[in-house]
Image (cartoon, rainbow, N blue to C red):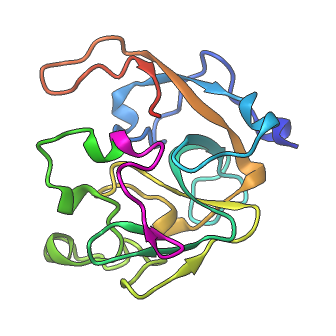
Amino acid sequence: KLEEYAELHYGQRIHAGEDILKLRKNSGDHLFVNRFTYNLRRPRRGEIIVFYSDHMPGLIQETHYIKRLVALGGEQVRIGNDRHVYINGQRLEASAPGFENVYGFDPKRDPERDHYSGHVNGFVARNLTDTTIAPLFPDEETVRVVPRKHYLALGDNTMSSSDGRTWGYVPREEVVGKSSFVFWPIGGTDNIPSRFGWSYP
């Protein structure tokens, strides 16, 4: 049951070393996780999910992770040379629910480098010696089918995120809940806007 894996509670910190969307352990973000919603319905594409890493090869065991749900069980996934995700042959556009802020978080960024980068090419290939950045998607011809009762979850900071492109799929029973609210820190800085408030989407 979901409750067996739901070891998060209100006010609990995400431990150092866990990915917190665009910012990592040194961000100090504190967030509330909604454990109730997924008792009533299944997670939806674009939602930010918190899941437990137990029995997931390639991840630190007995740790909570937070990523954005991109593909559902039974869907075909491909990452093209344009660095966009394709679900069942259709490009995942910025207008898709839950992805408006992924594509539009910073209007000054280079979209060719920040959308869901998959296999090594272009800028990445010239600057990395590790060609296994996305072993599940080695080229644009690779199509993966997400197993039933699993999800493909990716990090928003795709240039440095270890996510489903590397370690695969999240079993449904490992999903703890939906990220709902960042309650700390309250203020931002000149370079980083405040993240206080409801999680996107």
Task: Using residue 88 as the reference point, say whether residue 20 is left or right of it.
Answer: left
- Is 75 inside the magenta-drawn segment? no
Question: Which residue is nearer to you in this view: 166 or 36?
Answer: 36
Q: Hey, which quadrant is residue 178 in on the image?
A: top right
- Against 9, residue 113 (above or below) is below
Question: Which residue is nearer to you in this view: 185 or 87?
Answer: 87
Task: Using residue 147 as the reference point, say whether residue 158 is left or right of it.
Answer: left
Task: Return the x and y of residue 39 as percentages of the image width and height.
Answer: 81, 35
Q: Hey, which quadrant is residue 144 in on the image?
A: bottom right
Task: Return the x and y of residue 172 as percentages of the image width and height.
Answer: 74, 54
Q: Quadrant of the N terminus?
A: top right
- Against 200, residue 103 (above or below) is below
> Which residue is located at x 52 percent, y 33 percent?
15
Task: Using residue 73 as the reference point, say whether residue 195 is left or right of it.
Answer: left
- Is 87 inside the magenta-drawn segment? yes
Q: Main secondary structure of the magenta part?
A: loop
Extreme residue toward the bottom, this view: 141
> Which residue is located at x 51 percent, y 63 percent?
164
Task: Return the x and y of residue 6 as percentages of the image width and height.
Answer: 75, 34
Q: How many marks?
A: 0
> Which residue is located at x 38 percent, y 48 percent?
95
What's the magenta region?
86-101
Extreme residue toward the right, this view: 1
Task: Return the x and y of residue 104 as percentages of the image width and height.
Answer: 26, 42
Q: Hey, which quadrant is residue 149 in on the image?
A: bottom right
- Against 187, residue 176 (above or below) is below
Question: Which residue is nearer to you in this view: 156 or 134?
Answer: 156
